[in-house]
Structure formats: C-alpha cells, structure tokens
Image (cartoon, rainbow, N blue to C red):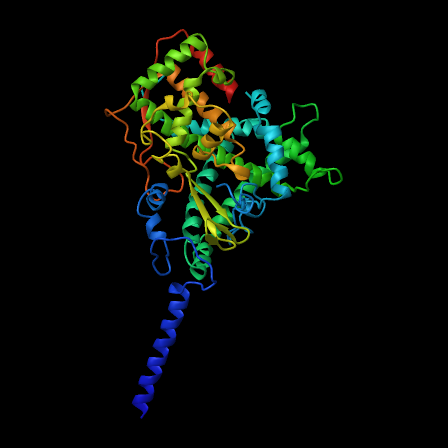
Amino acid sequence: MVDNFQEYLILIIICLFSLLCYSLFFKKPKDGFELPPSPPTLPIIKHLHLLLSGSTPKSLQKLSSREHEVNFSFRGTTPIDESLLVGSFGFFTAPYGDYWKFMKKVMVTKLLGPQALERSRVKNERVDIGKETMKFAKNIICKMIMGRSCNEENGEAERVSDLVAESTALTMKIFVANMFHKPLKKLGISLFRKEIMSVSCRFDEVLERILEEHENKKDDDQDMDLMDVLLETCRDETTAECRITRNHIKSLFVDLVIAGSDTSRHATQWTMAEIINNPNVVERLREENGAVVGETRLVQEKDLQNLPYLQATVKEGLRLHPPGALFARSSREGCKIRGFYIPVNTPLVVNAYAVMRDPDSWEDPNEFKPERFLGSPRSGQEHEREHALKYIPFGSGRRGCPGSNLDCTIVGIAIGVMVQCFDWKINSDKIDMEEAPRALVLTMARPLMCIPVARTCRLQVPDLEMSLNSQT
C-alpha cells in the first residue's frame, strides 16, 4: 500500500512539473488574435539560437507601411534602466513624448542642424583605420558638445574611449540577456549589475568635472556650446520648455559620444575597405577631388556639397554596411498590421541590413556601386518617398537618427582626406570583408590595417596638420 502511494505521489509530481513546463515554455496565449508567423522556438532561449548562428543582421535577413508609426516610436525599457546612467535619463531610449521631442529639437537646432554643422567646422607603419577614425569622430563630437576636444594630456580622452568601449560591450550582453524568458532575463541582467554601476560611476565623474568647468567659465569666455545651452535650460525653471536635470545632460553626452564615434568608426572602416577593393572608385574620387578642391589644400566640410561622387560613395558604404543594422522598437498598445495582431509591449526589430540588400529594391544589391546614387531618371515626391523607405541607414520616421547629417559629414571628410593624401597598401590582393559573428553592430571580423603611403602633391605637411586640427 505504501509503495503504491509513493508511486502515485511521484506520478502526480511528474504531471504537475510537466504542466508547469508546458505553461511556461510551450503554451501559446489564447487571446483570440492571429499572431504573425514565427520560426520554431526552443524552450527557455526562444529564438536566441537563430541570432547567434552568425552575423546578427544577416541571420535575421534569412528569416525575413507606415501604419502605427507613433505606436512603434517607443523603444521599450530594460530591467537595468534605473541603475544605468544612460538608462533612466537617456535621450535615445526615452519614450516618445514631450522630453524626447524637446531634446531632439535642442540637438537639431544647436548641434546637428545644417547651420550648426557649418559653424563647427610619415612612418612606414600599418594604421588601424577604425581606431584613428574613432579618435577623429570623438574629438569633433566633443568639441561641438562642450567646446573642446577630449584632453589627451591628462588621460581624459583615453578614459572616455575606454568607457565607450565598455558600454558597447555591455549593450551586447544586455541584449542577449533580454532574449531569455522573464525569470532567466532578470537573473542574467543581475550578473552585469556591478559592471553597469562601475561604468555609470566613472562616466559620472568625468561628466561632473566637465559640467563644473562650464559653470565656472566666464560668460564672455567663448561662444555657447550645447552644454552651455542645456545648463541654462536646467537653471531656468520658469520659462524652460521642458524640465531637465544634470543627469539628463550627462546622459545626452554619453548617448552622443557612444552613438556618434562608434558608428562613424565602423562606417568609415567599411567604406574604406570597399574603396581599396575597387581601384576604379579611388580613381574617380581623385578625379572629382582634383577638379573641385585642387591639390593645394585638403577637402573641407564646405566642399562636400560639390563632391557628388564622394557623397554617393559614403551612401553606398552605409547601404551595404549600416553600423546600426537593427533598430529596436516596442509597441505602446496592441494593434493590427495586415491582419496580424501585435500585442502591447511587443519588441520589434527593423532589419535595415536586409531592407538595403533587398534584390526587389536594389539592382545587384551586394555589389559596391556608388553610381547608383548619382541620379535617377525618375524624380519628384513619389520617388523621394520610395527612396526613403528602402534607404534607412539611420532609421526613419519620428525615431530616425537626428545625427545623420553629422555622421555623413564626418565619414565624408575622413574618406576624402584619406583618398586625397595617401595610397593604401595591404598585405593581400583584397581586403577580407567578413563580418564579425554574433555582433549587434556590423563590425569587420578583422580590423582594417593598412600602410599609408603619402602621394606626391603640393600639400605641405604643416598645412596638412593645421587643416586636420581645424576640423577636429
């Protein structure tokens, strides 16, 4: 009798455990709505195995209306938002609302708009083009935000660079943790809490020192930069359009430095690799540069509008290798799209990599052809609207990147100067264009290492250094 009771008890426990596993990992919600089709999932890890099988954008491309735009202008939150400096106060992850619209307005008018951009502007060793471009981009962004470049002498520049690298690595870890089921998601993210707090505290120390420098400088010391504008708004509690704090200012700085310098680095590195692999593009760039700029000075920001082939080359590089290949969004409320129901708080990913390599929209989509952007027999609003839907290296709609003009300017100047002044030698016939596996940001598997050989021209070395310094 006792043996039978034990057998029944074990059987009941097994049944209860099986029901629990089924309800947690296998049961689909019965809400009466038709959900979008999905590839098969695995228990606990869901679709994570599909994303980790290779380049993340390319993996999603293999799986692969403008309706409900406001609904999907929300990026969602993560469990670590309140402990991470850029989480609870950040601009890029803020909900679509008054604060986000105000900060975008300030950035576009004071930092990233065309008028603001206009106001701001030999050893035989191998050079890491990505690393050097990141320094170049970071110094431009820092000078525009706080009126000066990152200080190399006191180690400030190195500290900021290290923090940017750590933050980027943390983002990947948090993304992977968010792919798990809720109990495991919280457990996974809790493992990174100490690392998150360390990065936040070190960023806070650097930024607090910079804010104090701005508060202590004389009113007539220099022109107002973005940090001065935001500090003035922070102090003005009566007439300010939106209430912001010091933490909002710090988080905006972190967002801009991480987003601006890292994306410019990858965009320049990929585009230069494509250019070096296509000598005909190099020759055409130099012909255009010689006709417009000449050989006595460097390419400058004001020249870019008169260099259509250089602009087309930058666009083509961004089309093939968008740094932010995946755009994450979250639905604020449930809605229907083409007959399928999207529940509230559903995370969505827009795969820009797949959109801009779609053979139905692009001729020879995997080929590097800058001339595709030089003009079209079609024109008008309809063509521009169609082009905007299929060319999205910086996103689109309300949450499109406000710094797209700045990024194109940085990449354009960097590419223009490197092609104008140097021949680039590599150790093989072609550069390896393999993408790093399991990376959210489209990264080269191996850094682009080249030997710059100065070209014979009338540019003097002091002039070259002065011109580069004036642009950074």
* Percent position of residue 162, x then y: 45, 38
Residue at the far left in the pictured view: 429
Residue lying at 35% horizontally and 35% vertically, measured from the top left = 360
Residue toward you, 390 or 21: 390
Snapshot quadrant of residue 290: top left
Question: Is 335 placed above or below 166 here?
Answer: below
Residue lying at 42% horizontally and 43% vertically, measured from the top left = 169
Snapshot quadrant of residue 428: top left
Residue lying at 39% horizontally and 63% vertically, measured from the top left = 25
Residue 146 appears in view: no
Question: Is 275 placed above or below 58 here?
Answer: above
Left or right: residue 162 versus residue 101 is left
* Percent position of residue 153, x then y: 50, 28
Residue at the far right in the pictured view: 238
Snapshot quadrant of residue 459: top left
* Percent position of residue 192, x then y: 45, 52
